[in-house]
Amino acid sequence: MAEIEKILNVQAYISITLNFTSLDFGTLDVNTTNNPEPNNGINAINVSTNCDGRITFYSPSTPLTYDSYTIPNSNFKLNYTINTTSYPTLLTLDQDRVINVTDGDIVRPYYYLDIPDYQHSGTYSTTHVIEGWCA
Amino acid sequence: MNVCRIGLFVFFLFLLTPVAFSQIITVGIEPAKLTVYGNQDVTFKLFNDKGDTDAIYTFDFSECEEHIKFGDSCYDGSPVTVKKGTTRFDPVKIKVCFRPKKTVECRFYVEGKPVGYEQKGMVSIRPRIAVPVKIFFDETRTKSPMSAIIKNKEGKKETKSEGIIEKIKKIFIPTTSTTTTLKLPLKRVNPVKRTTTTIQKGKVSKSLLPVMLLMGSISAGLVIYVLGRYQMWW
């Protein structure tokens, strides 16, 4: 065995496995708050890593939009559990949210949406990036 | 009988429905953070070990693209299909060729989506991995430190790649050579012999004695002359 192997680095890896590809809040009434996404509690992110892991829930670069109407990102919220620990504080997605994760963690994000009064009816859509990375 | 068949059909349909709509993928990469010294070709492993469907990975190198060479045996930036069941130990590999223009820190992104994915629902989810890269520009380096030729104890040469970069860098920084040969334990190949001269008080070399006597005589003569002139003035 070459002596050099004594000083070899171990490379960092990370993977995230999502069992959901979209969120659908269904048909909601105006002037309602904290409408839960129907799959809350089912949606899960499995983390596999050997590094100081992070998951960032990004604020959508474009808010929920239908035609020229929008629902602001501050109305799009989440809280989460990591394994059996709950983090119930609702976090608005008007800014990126970063959480610490380790190998084997199962993160369950719970999404909620507020619909303002007088919001124009329509099918609103946006994109939400969930990012794993090594700090 | 027909009712039984319909019942069975419905039963199997329900069994199959979750599978048909399930689109679980893993987005995984190794290394997930790295430091690059000079020109370096890095092999990245992509895996989809927990997915139940094949994934398509797309890469966003925009932050780092100035320092990456595309194509010509290096990764060309096109989407990569990562089949379900691929692991870190049996991955899809891509070779990214770093060609630094300057020292910089940047990130690139690997985004995964299921093969045949069609956007549905209000909020489409985009899972991705960010890979932070520290790039050090080294204009003297002509060969990657990741492919170092290492002599083992038996004196046979081995080629080592990946993962040895940082610590080797601390020990041995090649400058202009195109091949890096490491021989451990490190020894000084051509030690520079240094001579030290020590002069001890009270000891004067014999070769300096006549000079010292001459200097002393001249000094004494000068003193006598000056004293004589001084006495005349008084």
Image (cartoon, coloured by chain):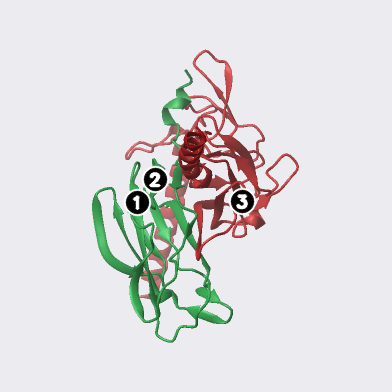
How many other residues sit within 10 Å of disc 1, few (<14), some (14-19) or many (≥20)?
Answer: many
Q: Position of residue A6 (x, y in %)?
A: 42, 27
Report the number of numbered marks: 3
State which chain is coloured green: A
Name the one closer to the observer, B209 or B225. Answer: B209
**Left or right, residue B112 beside residue B39:** left
Q: Residues within 10 Å of mark 2 (few under 14, many from 20)?
A: many
Q: Nearer the viewer, residue B112 or A21?
A: A21
Is residue A93 shown to the viewer in this render? Answer: yes
| Viewer-nearest residue: B116 or B13 | B13
Subunit bearing disc 3: B
Residue underneath mark 2 = A47
- The residue that appears at 43% across and 66% down in the rendered structure is A25
Q: Which chain is mark 2 on?
A: A
Q: Residue at x 57, y 82 (%)?
A: A68
Q: At 45% from the left edge and 46% from the top edge, which residue is drawn?
A: A17
- Indicate the secondary structure of the residue bearing disc 3: strand
Tag 2 secondary structure: strand
Residue type at tag 2 = Val
Q: Colour of chain B?
A: red
Please name the residue that numbered disc 1 is placed on: A107
Give the quarter of the image for residue B150: top right
Q: Residue furthest top?
A: B154
- For mark 1, name the chain: A
**Residue type highlighted by circle 1:** Val
Please tell me whether mark 1 or mark 3 is closer to you in this view: 1
Which residue is at 44% across, 32% downward? B206
Residue found at the very far left of the displayed protein: A85
| Marked residue nearer the N-terminal end (1 or 2) | 2
Q: Are marks 1 and 2 in contact (CB under 8 Å)?
A: yes
Return the mark for residue B58: 3
